Image (spheres, rainbow, N blue to C red):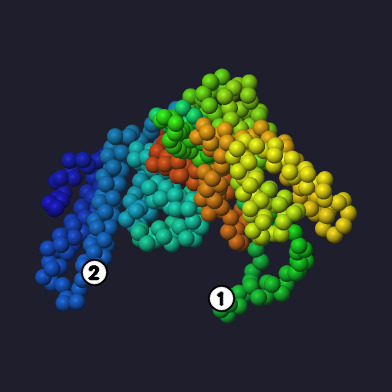
């Protein structure tokens, strides 16, 4: 590394007055010296560590010192770059300039601490203040694409990505393994909410997959996430009372528990989760090669706390973007777990008139679960006879003989007395199974589906529900507001879809464009979550 000298930098000095010249020269000279010292330390480490190391020093000792020396060089380089850019900015920009219809006046440089991947750096920048009053901006930030956050966009983006996979505390801890100054949990949550404001817009313009297959498969399912009740939310947002410090962590909260009113013990069947449903959509295509359909191709996941109809609205628009618009003659298969609401959505957004070759399917596992429950009306739970009977019914379903299954259940119902010990429960199980199969008889032709090599199960969306939603948002002690959970889940979908590295620059460009257009400072971080989508304002 050649040592930097003052004449090398002087070519790009920004000089407006003798006082400014002296100030800039002194500042840049100090930063050049700091960078040279850091570079010298890095060179010395590489050259002399083999001969000067102690007898018990190992490679990991060298690596640890190398990491810190590299960070020191990076911090010094960053500070020098920022100082040089600010000097250039002051020279090229007049004392008064116009952005849009607003005239701005430059003020004196102000110091700033800025957290980067390599640690905190210090630099100065001038502030552009509107002549008529109001919020201004920092021209250097506009030039370099920096936002109002005191943390680099790269560091915030990595922290946000981690926070979509684990709790905020865990994300901060893991990030702290790799950077000197990891952002706080509050900053990570605010970053998730900030990027979450752009998630809905991204799903509207996300890259359309290329090389799709001939058949589109769309699966729908739901998952309840534990949410906070209004009373608890009001308590969270209320004024905090001062508490005396506890003598140790194990004593913390004891006085508070004594003061609180003990809630009544829950009865059997009572729920404390207060779950609110997320609708999850998984879409992919299949390509035919001979008698087989190969896939899944271009798998995409979408999840939202919005109305179920919003999820179908998204699926319909995404299908059109993939070449399966209304009126298509190609096959569109739609799978659900049998939820009547989901079937109504299928008929509304993927009706047979607009999608003449649609195939609507109920997951075979959910059908078999109904049969296991109905079989307990005649056979003992867990018995070999029950398993054998369900096996026979499964063979009938795969032979497209659902009518035989329904007829046998009806025969059992007729043979079961209306009175007597346990008969009411037996009849209820049989009636539920008959009703379930009878109303879905046109959606359980599993033999035909298998012959066409189509899907008969919803395993893809069941896995997405667990990985995208449950793994992050459904743990003991968690209580979300829907809007904040929405930000986490939608960002997680973007990551799962493989779009993260394209989404982050796009979201940052939106913020930068808004900052340049208005001449105001913009931030990634925010305390306000985006509103939940509706059918009219779909994501």
Residue 127, image x, y percentages: 40, 42
Residue at (46, 44) in percent of width and height: 496
Residue that numbered label 2 is attached to: 61
- Looking at the rendered structure, the secondary structure element under dot 1 is helix
Q: Is residue 338 above or below residue 44?
A: above
Residue 399 can be seen, yes or no: yes
- Residue 437: percent from left, percent from top: 70, 40
Question: Where does residue 118 sit, x and y in percent of width and height?
Answer: 32, 55
Q: CA distance from mark 1 to mark 2?
A: 36 Å
Instruction: Tell which of 331 and 97 is nearer to you.
Output: 331
Place of residue 434 in the rendered image (x, y in percent of width and height, measured from the top left): 74, 42
The nearer-to-camera label among 1 and 2 is 2
Q: Is residue 65 left or right of residue 444?
A: left
Determine crowd level at label 1: few under 14, some 14-19, many 20+ residues with C-alpha closer than 10 A.
Answer: few
Give above or below for 315 relative to 24: above
- Disc assigned to residue 249: 1
Dot label at residue 90: none
Number of labelled discs?
2
Pick the front one: 442 or 272 = 442
Q: Decide if residue 318 is on the left or right side of residue 119.
A: right
Front in this rendered view, residue 306 or 457: 457
Q: Residue furthest right?
A: 419
Q: What residue sits 53% from the left and 26% below the top?
A: 331
Q: Residue at x 58, y 80 (%)?
A: 247
Crowd rating for badge 2 (residues with CA inside 10 Å; few <14, some 14–19, many 20+): few
Location of residue 386 by image quarter: bottom right
């Amino acid at each position: 590394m050649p040592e930097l000298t003052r004449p090398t930098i002087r070519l790009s000095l920004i000089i407006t007055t003798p006082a400014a010249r002296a100030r800039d020269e002194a500042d840049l000279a100090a930063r050049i010296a700091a960078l040279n010292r850091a570079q010298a330390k890095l060179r010395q480490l590489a050259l002399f560590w083999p001969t000067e190391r102690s007898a018990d020093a190992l490679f990991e000792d060298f690596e640890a010192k190398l990491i810190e020396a590299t960070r020191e060089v990076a911090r010094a380089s960053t500070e020098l770059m920022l100082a040089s850019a600010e000097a250039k900015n002051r020279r090229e920009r007049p004392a008064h300039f116009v952005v849009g219809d607003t005239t701005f006046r430059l003020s004196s440089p102000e110091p700033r601490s800025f957290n980067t991947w390599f640690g905190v750096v210090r630099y100065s920048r001038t502030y552009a203040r509107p002549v008529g009053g109001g919020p201004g901006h920092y021209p250097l930030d506009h030039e370099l694409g920096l936002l109002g956050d005191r943390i680099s966009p790269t560091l915030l983006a990595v922290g946000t990505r981690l926070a979509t996979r684990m709790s905020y505390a865990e994300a901060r801890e893991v990030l702290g393994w790799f950077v000197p100054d990891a952002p706080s949990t509050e900053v990570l949550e605010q970053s998730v909410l900030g990027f979450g404001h752009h998630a809905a817009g991204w799903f509207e313009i996300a890259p359309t997959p290329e090389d799709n297959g001939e058949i589109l498969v769309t699966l729908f399912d739901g998952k309840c996430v534990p949410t906070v009740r209004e009373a608890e939310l009001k308590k969270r947002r209320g004024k905090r009372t001062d508490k005396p410090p506890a003598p140790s962590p194990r004593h913390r909260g004891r006085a508070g528990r004594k003061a609180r009113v003990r809630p009544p013990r829950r009865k059997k069947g009572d729920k404390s989760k207060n779950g609110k449903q997320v609708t999850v959509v998984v879409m992919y295509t299949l390509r035919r090669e001979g008698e087989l359909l190969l896939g899944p191709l271009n798998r995409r996941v979408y999840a939202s706390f919005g109305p179920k109809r919003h999820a179908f609205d998204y699926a319909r628009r995404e299908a059109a973007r993939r070449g399966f618009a209304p009126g298509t003659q190609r096959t569109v298969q739609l799978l659900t777990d049998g939820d009547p609401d989901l079937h109504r959505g299928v008929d509304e957004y993927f009706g047979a008139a607009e999608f003449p070759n649609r195939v609507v399917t109920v997951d075979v596992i959910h059908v078999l679960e109904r049969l296991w429950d109905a079989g307990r009306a005649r056979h003992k739970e867990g018995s070999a006879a029950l398993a054998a009977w369900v096996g026979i019914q499964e063979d009938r379903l795969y032979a497209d003989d659902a009518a035989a299954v329904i007829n046998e259940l009806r025969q059992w119902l007729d043979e079961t007395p209306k009175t007597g010990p346990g008969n009411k429960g037996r009849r209820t199980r049989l009636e539920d199974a008959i009703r379930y199969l009878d109303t879905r008889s046109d959606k359980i032709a599993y033999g035909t589906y298998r012959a066409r090599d189509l899907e008969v199960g919803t395993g893809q969306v069941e896995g997405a529900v667990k990985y995208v939603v449950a793994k992050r948002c459904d743990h003991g002690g968690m209580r979300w507001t829907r809007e904040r959970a929405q930000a986490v889940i939608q960002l997680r979908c973007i990551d799962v879809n493989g779009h993260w590295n394209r989404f982050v620059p796009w979201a940052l460009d939106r913020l930068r464009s808004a900052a340049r257009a208005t001449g105001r400072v913009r931030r990634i971080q925010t305390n306000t979550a985006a509103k939940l989508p509706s059918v009219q304002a779909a994501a």
